[in-house]
Every structure is written in C-alpha cells, then in structure tokens.
Image: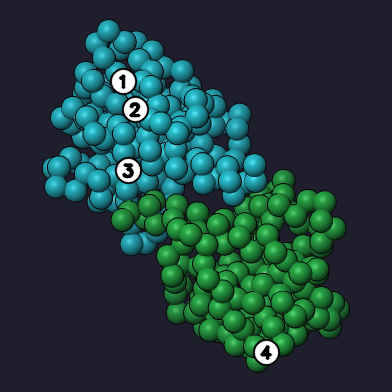
Chain colours: A cyan, B green
Amino acid sequence: MSRLDSFIRRLEAQRACLDFSLQNLVPGAVIELGLGNGRSYDHLSERLAGSGRTIYALDRQLAAHPDCVPAELILGDFRDTLPRLAVRLGRTVAFVHADTGSGDEAASRAQALALPALLDPLLVDGAIVVSDQDMAPGWEALPLPDGVAPGRYFIWRRSANHSSA
Amino acid sequence: MSRLDSFIRRLEAQRACLDFSLQNLVPGAVIELGLGNGRSYDHLSERLAGSGRTIYALDRQLAAHPDCVPAELILGDFRDTLPRLAVRLGRTVAFVHADTGSGDEAASRAQALALPALLDPLLVDGAIVVSDQDMAPGWEALPLPDGVAPGRYFIWRRSANHSSA
C-alpha cells in the first residue's frame, strides 16, 4: 500500500467516523482539537450548520487556510488551553474530534495519552470523542462504522459509568 | 461539499488517473512534476517497482517526507529544470504526472499553460501526461476513468499527430 493509498484510507476513515458520530449527538458544544489546515473543521461546520452548536478550534499555532479561520480559535499548548477552556465552559461539550497525530509517532502517542484527563472535565454525559490516536481513555469504546479498520480511527463515549479518564 | 469531501475526491481522482494510465504505458522514463510531500511519487514508485523505469522528481524546493526523498531529485524552477532535463535525456519520457496546483489559482493556471511546451521535447510518441491542472495542450485528451468528474483531473496522450504542445 503506497503512502497515497494509506492517506486516502485515513481521510475516508476520518470522514466516516465524523459522519457516523454526528448522527446521534447529545446537546452541547463541539471541539476540534488539532485544527491543522482546517479541512475537518470545515467538514464539521458544514455538517453542523444550523444546529446552533459552537465549534471551538484548538491548535498549537494557526496553519489553516485563510478562508477557513474559525470564529472560536484558541491557540497554545493543549495542556494550557484545555484547562482554561474547562474553567470557561464547564462540562458543556458533546463532541470532540482530536486529530493530533504528527509525523513524530512517539510524541503523538505521548500527547494522546495525556488528552483524556484534559478533555474529561469538559464532557457532558454521553459526549462522543473521535480521534486518530489511541488515547486509551476510561471512556467506552464504540464500534467503528463499516469500512473503517480497527486501529485506524477511534470513537469513544463518555458516560457517568465510564467517567474516569 | 466540505473541504474534506473535496480533498478526498481530488485524491481519489488522482489515484484513479494514475492507476488507469499506468496500465498501458509505452517504454520510457517517468517524471513526477511537483513532488510536494511525496505521496504520489511513492505511489508511482510502488506501482512501477520492478519495471526498470527511472522516475525523475522535480519541484521548486524539497518538502517531501524524509523517508521518501527520490533518488533522482531535480530542484528549481520548471522553466529552468525541464529544458536542462530535455538536453540531458532527449525524447525518452513515457509518463508525466504533473501535480502542480497551489492555493494560488491564477498562478497555478499560468504555470500549467507553460508546461506543454516545456514537456513536449521530453515525450516519446504515445507518452501519457496526467495532471491536476488543465494545461490546454495540443496533445490528445483521453477519457477519464469511471468515477472521475470532468475537470477534476486530466489525461492526455502525446502522439506524432498531436505533437504541437
């Protein structure tokens, strides 16, 4: 499988997991964690248009397409920005897309493992978290949509019974 | 259609056009014009493994993944590098993939229109050119593979009867 094949599969898996998860969201805000160039933010914006949900986009620095700079943009290290957002919003977030992997696999994995504890204080009961990385959280793992191979993308649901991140 | 949808369609079209074109290549070398991060170069390398064809990768500057730096890498402006390559190789190239579009549509279009005259002296009779841009060449336009919308990608064949680039 070429890098082009692999990249297409990853993007198709991302889109399938986003579309699948958005079908049954509980009420609440949305977080795009790892804005990057803004393609999946644009996808969430389009799919959630008219829903009244605010989408908060977080990243270390802005690399998004100029036509696609989010209204609610929060720049900085997630270890700083997520705790501040939790103070600001409280437990009001229904959906998180964490697309945080970089070319450095070890760094990506270490960062992913730190995210559940940072995200959990923001999540309402029944919130869904979709990620390109295995965060190994205490949340409940959900089945992946058809065509998405295990390990390629991840979907979890935070519930009162699985709240220990 | 979101930017994610559009990007996936573009990559799927790219792969479909590459795979379709590689099925019936005449003998000769290969040019990847616009190496970028090297995903389509990697795809060509994999699909052509064992064929004995040399793949020349050209770009303005190197941005490819470190694991994927081509053996035959030629950096510089295409207006300089293509004429030099034509002197070096003569008319020995059977396949060109030109993935030269950037965020600047006007610049991408102007560059694309200059490419046929730069490429033609390299192409053997029956050579195939695949591009993300409409180069408006004198070469014969070929039908696109199933699922690729007209205008999304382009395939041409250079023949003695259509040699005026």
Q: What is the three-letter code of the residue carrying label 4?
A: Asn
Say what secondary structure mark 1 lies in. Answer: strand
Q: What is the three-letter code of the residue carrying label 3?
A: Ala
In the image, A26 versus A54, the foreground residue is A26
Q: Do the residues labelled 2 and 1 touch (CB within 8 Å)?
A: yes
Asked whether, in this view, residue A126 is left or right of residue B135, the answer is: left
The label on residue B161 is 4
Question: Do marks 2 and 3 share a subunit?
Answer: yes
Question: Do marks 2 and 1 share a subunit?
Answer: yes
Label 2, label 3: how many angstroms apart (C-alpha)? 14 Å
- Residue at the spot of label 3: A57
Asked whether, in this view, residue A98 is left or right of residue A120, the answer is: right
Question: Do marks 4 and 2 share a subunit?
Answer: no
Residue A132, above or below B61: above
| First reached walking from the N terminus: tag 3 or tag 1 | 3
Say what secondary structure mark 2 lies in. Answer: strand
